[in-house]
Image (spheres, rainbow, N blue to C red):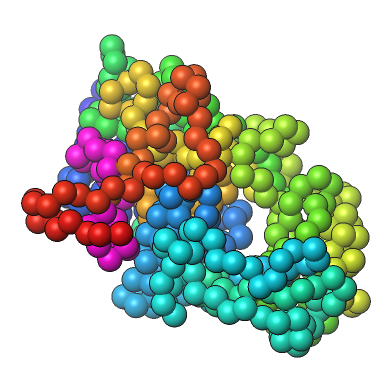
Amino acid sequence: MYPSRTADIAIIGGGIIGMSCAYELARQGAEHIVVFDKSNPASGTTGGSAGVVCLHDFDELYACFTLIGYARYQQLRHDYNFTLNSWGSLKVMYEPSAFPPTPDAFHQRFGGGEESIYYHEVLQPQALLHRYPWIKAERVKGGVFYPNQGFIDPYELVELYERLALETGRVEIHRNTPVLQIRTQGDRITSVVTRRGQWQVDRVLNAGGPWGAKIAALAGTHLALTPQRVQVCVATAFDDGVETAPLTGIPESVQGEGVWCRGELGGTLLFGQHHDTTKPGYTVDPDYVNRANDPDYPQAVEQVYRRFWHLPRSAFLNGWCCVYGTTEDGFPIISRDTRLRNFYHAVGLNGHGITLHAGTARAVAELLLHESTSLDLSDVLGKPARLDFSGLHAGRFTSGKLLKFELHNTISVPPPGNGAEQTKE
């Protein structure tokens, strides 16, 4: 009879969330972590993402997680020569929008100097069209360009986290090792059964992305997470001399869905669907999903974008599909399970995981290592402050305490003492 192996923490899912959590937990002192991926790291949602690093100003939590993520990318660039392609993001203002725009409350609260992710240039119409000649002039009033935003290669990022996690000597990573069963006793998980045997575990983290609800079901738990299919098509912009296009969009939808665009290495353009909450008509089983575009999708994107952009030679081609883990209110689930005391979830990033992964990993470390839902922000805000992320609890969907996209107050300044001085706003 084979003996069971043991781990302090088992992480199910080897995408950017699972791998960054493994590194963060090990970095903060967790002893023995094992990561199980049903295929290979980054082979699911992470690998299918466009790798965009940009602002997510929905509320304070999203804004602060964005700051944490941006700071992590700067650290990885400095320490490990990691590639952040700073091609920027561009908001084109069309009539009847007001121009120049007034800085919003998020810029005022979280913006900084020239190194900040909020740093921007206001472009008058002539300057905008000179810099981006493929944008048609009709109705354009100007634009706002954010030069410090951009995109990364998700595979490069996960490979780096994998290397850093293994270098701690506290992490094991098991490829092609699906978890088939989660065994429980009372209100605790006792073991996980994989294709290569059983592991006795003290704590389990569900980092399965759109497979998160299926993983929860293995433990007899319901998770309000919905896998939804999104499409990305490709245009051969190099045929029109486009080289480094920023992340941008147009003021119309394609087949009822918003579509972003960013440049890619080699001179292509990527056009991707996106919605920030669970939306009817997009739900799929992530194990049985069409990975190619719908036959009419590239042509539908082409038809709409050609009304705003001048790309006469570019061909719009079939790309791929990705599956996001989405939630009803558009916020992630980062919490202990509602039923099992040693089961935790870090899922439902709604397509924003590339930017938010480092904040998610730090929140997970607070939960698993300190049983806390308060996150220290002093390193990214430059003053003593903490973020309450208890609202991301998995039970909010049944209790009716859904979160809203608005600027409310989840950041607190610690009182004097305990090494923190009172900071005036």
Residue occupying the point 81% across, 45% down? 256
Asked whether 335 or 397 is in front, the reply is: 397
Magenta span includes 250: no
Left/right of residue 303 with respect to residue 224 in the rendered view: right
Tell me if 222 is positioned left or right of 227 in this view: left
Quadrant (top left/top right/bottom left/bottom right) for the C terminus = bottom left
Q: Is residue 381 magenta?
A: yes
In the shown orientation, is residue 66 left or right of residue 239? left
Residue 380: quarter of image: bottom left
Q: Position of residue 352 (x, y in %)?
A: 53, 51
Can residue 153 be seen by looking at this rendering?
A: no
Above-or-below relation of 250 to 193: below
Residue 63 versus residue 11: which sits nearer the camera?
63
Where is residue 57 shown, x and y percent of the image? 52, 55
Q: In the image, which residues are magenta?
A: 362-385
Residue occupying the point 29% across, 15% down? 187
Residue 246 appears at what percent x and percent y?
65, 73
Q: Give the quarter of the image for residue 72.
A: bottom left
